[in-house]
Amino acid sequence: GDSIAYVEIGVWGFYSRRTVVDLLGLVTPSSVPYARVGDRVGAFLERPTDWVAFHSRGGMAPLLERAWFPRAYESRVRFDEGGGRELVLYRQTSRMKVPPPRPPRPGGSGAGRLKAAPPPSVRSERPEEP
């Protein structure tokens, strides 16, 4: 079936029952190196999807701003939420393929970096002395 890319993927995966590519790496491990350096476009290029979801409050603008995006995707559905907010679904067209995958670029194209979790604290296995 079709796949979709977005940054907050829980609802999409649950309700659509489609393959969801998570550009932050929560369920798409190949996105993690890109998310660590804030490169959402690189994460997308690693695994392009049939559909792209854009919400005005989300972090997908760097992808839509690429020169190749309007030639590779077209707007299919637009939901106006009022107050300047909207959700737009883009479908890949057959006119052009997206650029090939590339290595992560620090600060390359995204809103913020994914920070690695700090290591868990180490506790002593010895019982406390009275």
Image (cartoon, grey):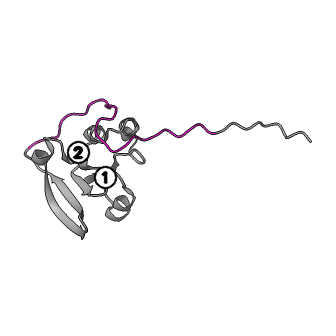
Instruction: Determine whether 101 is above or below 3 in the image.
Output: above
Q: Which residues are magenta?
A: 96-120
Tell me what residue is drawn at x 10 percent, y 42 percent. 96
Tell me what residue is drawn at x 37 percent, y 35 percent. 37
Q: Main secondary structure of the magenta part?
A: loop
Asked whether the beta carbons under mark 2 and mark 1 sit within 8 Å of each other, the answer is no
Residue denoted by label 2: 63
Tell me what residue is drawn at x 84 percent, y 40 percent. 127
- Farthest residue to the left: give it: 95
Front residue of 15 and 116: 116
Instruction: Determine whether 112 is above or below 13 in the image.
Output: above
- Disc 2/disc 1 C-alpha distance (Å): 10 Å
Residue denoted by label 1: 6
Residue flagged by tag 1: what amino acid is it? Tyr
Residue flagged by tag 2: what amino acid is it? Leu
Examine the structure image and report whether residue 106 is included in the region drawn in magenta: yes
- Farthest residue to the bottom: give it: 82
User: Element at badge 2?
Assistant: helix
